[in-house]
Image: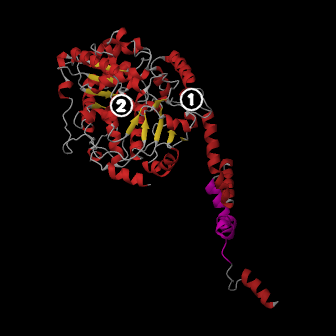
Amino acid sequence: MQNHAYNRLGSFGGGAAVPSPPLSPRRAWGRKASVKGGGSVRAGAVAGWGGGAVRRAARAVLAALLRRQAVFLFAPLLYVAAMLLYMGSISLDSVPRIISRPAPGSMYRSPHLYARLRADMDADNATDALATVWRHAYKDGIWRPCISNNTNGLPESNGYIYVEANGGLNQQRTSICNAVAVAGSLNATLIIPNFHYHSMWRDPSKFSDIYDEDRFIHLLKNDVRVVDKVPEFIMERFGHNLSNVYNFKIKAWSPIQFYEDVVLPKLIEERLIRISPFANRLSFDAPPAVQRLRCLANFEALKFSKPITTLSNTLVSRMREKSAENNGKYVAVHLRFEEDMVAFSCCVFDGGDSEKKELDAARERGWRGKFTRPGRVIRPGAIRMNGKCPLTPLEVGLMLRGMGFSNNTAIYLASGRIYKAEKNMAPLLEMFPLLQTKETLASDEELAPFKNFSSRMAALDYSVCVHSEVFVTTQGGNFPHFLIGHRRYLYGGHAKTIKPNKRRLAILFDSPRIGWKSLKRQLLNMRAHSDAKGIEIKRANESIYTFPCPGCMCRSNKSEHSKSIQAR
């Protein structure tokens, strides 16, 4: 008790005081005034804060916040609420408007550019690009064709292969060449490929209608056996019905090893197999022996039939007459601006609401529901910026004039029916009045046997483009794919092809302040880039049809490969 009393006295009396525990930091601020200094300190604090009700309230709020620090989590909400109250008191008329500008290259403004630059373009007509367009030569040694003759003879056939070539002219060409490569690799006899009729192309042409069948069989006789029909004794086994023949459904881009491991055993067992469809069913990357057979088929064995060759030679002669001022040199342009191509691209041009309605209807006719399914987002501006929109005839004219081709350059236009031709072709004809098509070069009587056959009409375009001094491709596809390789094969390793950078073109043609000199300088650089690219050699996984390269041109020992297949 005494000790207890002593402690109490020591605490409050004059003796030595026992030190109290330190105050909590959270509560120290609020208690300092009351512990030390008593009422006088508290009075000083009140005087410091002021006697106003607002200041007293602010002090009370601050003290409460310090006691409950979690309240600070709500500070952002309080700030936002205050800002909303503040903004609500301001008139919207005083808020500046944010103007959204389309991204460069996202709009079709080529007609405005043409109207603005036309006077300068017409005044600058002195350059002649046909004389200087190609400056580079093939540099990777001596250019050799990817063909070598085989004189080793053929071993006994392992059976017959029947393929159905689907698609348009050049997709069918892929199927034919791949069929030759597969048949040769398996020591099989190839039946002349059957062309599958498709509702899109609506062309019932047979192989012999488009290609010289006798030449095809003759040129391949030392490498692959080719016959025009299945022998009777084989068909008897299947009741003379090809639908009874075993049909392989082969995955696209399959390697040749798959055919050797999977197809060959069935071929030996059945003696006749069917592969349908066959387009793109063989990998681009293949051994030299396979590539050689592809080259042999594509560049030598496949020649167009006599009617097509006769008329195409006539068209080439007439084009050279039209370009007499340029020593018979002319430019061929592959223009993809048909209605189906324009509709499929989902790009916006300058036709307004009527164009939108027309193209929406065309999309629905050709690809029912494909572009209107839920969740499908179509952004025409992004498509144009990515270089996916087909070039219009006007843009092709601007590009060629900017690349230095004068208005006396003869142009051959390889195309189907141009979308709104009367309107869209007018500016191109203004820039190049010597422009020709197969319809303007040939009479109605000359074209009559070809007009209702899309593949035969495409074959005429192909032949005229092959012999041009310059080939201009404006859109991807099988047509330029094969043509570029064919031109490399014929012209010493140089494709002599202008392949424009369409992303760059979209920005240039959407530039509201660009002048003619600046535009021409950049387009000349683009042309020079095409010249340098024209002599490139084949890279890995590139098509042999586009790059008939020296690396694939070495003579392969086909007999040893055939013996290994035969041994299986």
Element under disc 2: helix
State the mark number for residue 480.
2
Q: Is 64 positioned to the left or the right of 179 in the image?
A: right
Circle 1 SS class: loop
Residue 151 falls in image quadrant: top left
Give the residue at x 34% y 47%. 289
Q: Position of residue 218 (x, y in %)?
A: 32, 33
> How far from the left and from the top, in percent, is residue 153?
31, 45
Instruction: Using the image as rendered, state which of residue 431 and residue 130 is in the foreground.
Output: 130
Residue 391 shows in this picture: no
Q: Upstream in the sequence, badge 2 or badge 1?
A: 1
The foreground one among 461 and 532 is 461
| C-alpha distance separating marks 2 and 1 | 27 Å
* Image mark for residue 457: none
The magenta region covers 21-49
Quick one: which residue is furthest to the front in this view?
A: 233
Q: Which amino acid lies under the numbered mark 1 shown in the image of this protein?
A: Phe
Graded by Cα atoms within 10 Å as few (under 14), some (14 to 19) or many (20 or more), the crowding at tag 2 reads many
Q: Residue 536, relative to residue 197: is it above or below?
A: below
Quarter of the image for the N terminus: give it.
Answer: bottom right
Q: Is residue 33 magenta?
A: yes
Q: Is residue 440 above or below residue 191?
A: above
Image point (33%, 46%), residue name: 539
Q: How many marks?
A: 2
Q: Quadrant of residue 449?
A: top left
Can residue 108 be found in the magenta stretch?
Answer: no
Locate residue 392, reporting x and y percent.
39, 22
Residue 479 location in percent, x, y? 38, 29
